[in-house]
Amino acid sequence: MASALNVLQQQVIACTRCPRLRAYCLEVARKKRRAYLDWEYWGKPVPAFGDPEARVMIIGLAPAAHGANRTGRMFTGDASGDFLYRVLYETGFASQAESRSRDDGMRLRDAWITASARCAPPDNKPTREELANCRPYLEAEIDLLTKVRVVVALGRIAFDTYLSILQDRRRIDRKSRFAFGHGAEHEMGEGLPTLIASYHPSQQNTSTGRLTAQMLRDVFERARELLGDRGTRSRKPSRG
């Protein structure tokens, strides 16, 4: 499994399916941000990251222009990643609380971090076509990560992307049956992981208090509970 995942991530890195995104990522890498002038930006599609034996899959939106597009690792080098990895560390899914670079020693335990899009999009808004171009990589990860029992979708786009895969595979009849809201928990059916929705840890959400550290901890503490107890407990989602 690990070797197949490694091959898949090399395919991600070499991907050229979205000319607009490739041009944008390379331009950002060329111009850089003043604070990172001494960095050699990654500037390529960003591979997924984590434990090949993971029982929790975390799906985000896309790399940040000066975060993962700079460092080459999901949620690494920006405020969203700082927020996420601290919570993952506190709930036992990460070996350390900060993720700064690909070689900082970070290890994920029982978790796999991926995204709906693997290239940084302008204004953090990939098009539908770009999301569709990237979806096969997520589908392949779903097939290869056979031990996953919980999927955590960070944000509405990740939530909808995952549901669209299940719908197209005829594992669910329609996406509209599954409401998005922070902490919303859905049993998807026999043989499928439990889906938990979360607000994305973007600065727009965290700086306004729409998403607090405790709210995100609650999501991953619930994921922990589900790994040990597949009961029918559910939580009412927060709206907004």
Image (cartoon, rainbow, N blue to C red):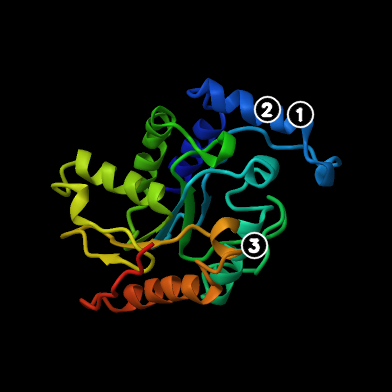
Numbered badge on residue 82:
3
Nearer the observer, 30 or 107 = 30
Neighbour class for label 2 at 10 Å: few (<14), some, many (≥20)? some
The residue lying furthest to the left in this view is 173
- Disc number at residue 26? 2
For the residue labelled by badge 2, is the local secondary structure a helix, a strand or a loop? helix
Left or right: 84 as drawn, with respect to 174: right
Question: Residue 108 at what x, y percent from top left?
Answer: 55, 62
Where does the image place residue 198, in percent across and percent down from the top left? 41, 62
Is residue 23 depicted above or below 37 in this figure? above
- The disc, 3 or 2, on the residue closer to the chain's N-terminal end is 2
Q: Residue at x 34, y 73 (%)?
A: 227
Q: Residue at x 63, y 28 (%)?
A: 24
Which disc number belongs to residue 9? none
Quadrant of image for the C terminus: bottom left
Q: Where is residue 93 shown, x and y percent of the image? A: 52, 69
Labels 3 & 2 near each other (Cβ < 8 A): no
**Amino acid beneath label 3:** Asp
Task: Tell me if label 1 and label 3 are in contact, CB under 8 Å.
Answer: no
Q: Quadrant of residue 36?
A: top right
Q: Residue 117 placed where, x, y %? A: 47, 39
